[in-house]
Amino acid sequence: MTRILGIAVLGHGGIARAHVSAVRRHAEAFPEAPATGRIVAVVGRTAASAAAAAARLGAERGTTDWRATIDDPAIDAVINVGPTSLHAEPSLAALRAGKAVLCEKPLARTGGEAAAMTRAARESGRAAMTGFNYRFVPAVLLARRLLLDGSLGRLYHFRSRYSDDSLLDPTAPFTWRHDRDAAGSGVIGDLASHAIDVAHFLAGPIAAVTASTRTYTEQRPYGGADRPVTVDDAVVATLEFHGGAVGTLEASGMCPGRKNHLWFEINGERGTLVFDLERLNELRVYHGDGPARGLADVLVTERDHPFGGRWWPPGHIIGWEHTFVHQFDEFVRRAVEAGGEQVGATFEDGAASARVCDALLLAAETGRRVSVGSGVDPSPVAPGR
């Protein structure tokens, strides 16, 4: 019989809804999975907000005590979607209590904080994943397959940008995301960390960076006064990869009309791959063969494509929320040590991204080229399903 894992969700902000939806829909797409989950508890800052979130999300209870929740024998796994400042302590406690942990990105505020989480995960032997859900977009996994197959040959360039318009309104109130002590960084941790992880996943580890940042809205309203914004609104960077490729990275919340524009282009000696999250079912591919050569749009919905046949017939597209279902399936398989392919980001991968974020901040502050700090390299992964 399928094992039912008791899940605690720490935090109940917008991203919690995506994770809870994934838990609910998991058995629909993966009926053969050795385990699935049920939401036992949602943890919030106040009793009222936790109770309301539990009712809204369909949890069995709401609570403010994450420590007691982690120690509850009914809890097998923790999904940590709290502010970045609350990623390390509860995740460390959960791992030491023998629970599996899926922690939202960025894994931590700094590379050092992420390294401590990685050590705890290794020592616990429990499943520990970082929530870089874009690894589970079928088109991204197809790109990974083509790269592993050598279709592009030697890689020359990886260019990426992640743009939205979430920071445009200067009257939007100050939150923890605008505070470096709480968040670690601004768009570097919130947006660029995704692009960094995709870069590691597809092109290999980043060795060195240069960067420039800007904070365009220097103060935001808070409690009848203004508070200074201490994080970045935008970053532009150059990347050097261990494998020899070079590239660029941009991230900004100041781009009118852009809503969730994670884009990358990879150029190799024999081809090019282009992806845009706002058209997430498509991958543009150039092989350079034949008289009709050119960039072709591939609709990644065939049965032999990653996750093909899990949802709908070919030509019927999926959405952003499905990536969380794919991610949750791998999480529960790891939690029960079922084996199989693993493409999701580990805590080591989360720490690797955090080291690059640290390097970007340092490069921007000093105006110098910065080598990425030493540590565990991003984990090797097999081609996607």
Image (cartoon, rainbow, N blue to C red):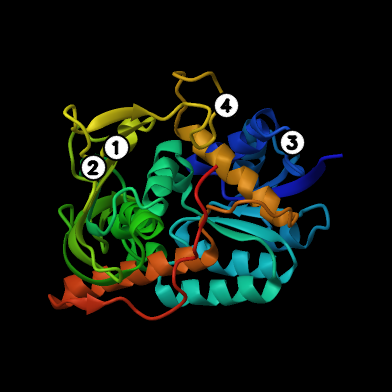
Instruction: Give whichever of discs 3 and 4 has the lower sequence position.
Output: 3
Question: Which residue is label 4 attached to?
Answer: 309
Give the foreground label among 3 and 1: 3
Instruction: Give whichever of discs 4 and 2 has the lower sequence position.
Output: 2
Instruction: Give whichever of discs 4 and 1 has the lower sequence position.
Output: 1
Name which residue lies at 66% across and 51% down. Answer: 340
Q: CA distance from mark 2 to mark 3?
A: 49 Å
Q: CA distance from mark 3 to mark 4?
A: 14 Å
Instruction: Give whichever of discs 2 and 1 has the lower sequence position.
Output: 2
Instruction: Give whichever of discs 2 and 3 has the lower sequence position.
Output: 3
Question: Which residue is label 2 attached to?
Answer: 171
Which of the numbered marks, if any, corresponds to residue 320?
none
Instruction: Please provide percent x and percent y for residue 213.
Output: 17, 62
Give the foreground label among 2 and 1: 1
Give the foreground label among 2 and 3: 3
Instruction: Please provide percent x and percent y for residue 145.
Output: 43, 46
Which of the numbered marks, if any, corresponds to residue 32?
3
Return the residue found at the far left. 367
Q: Nearer the viewer, residue 244 or 332?
A: 244
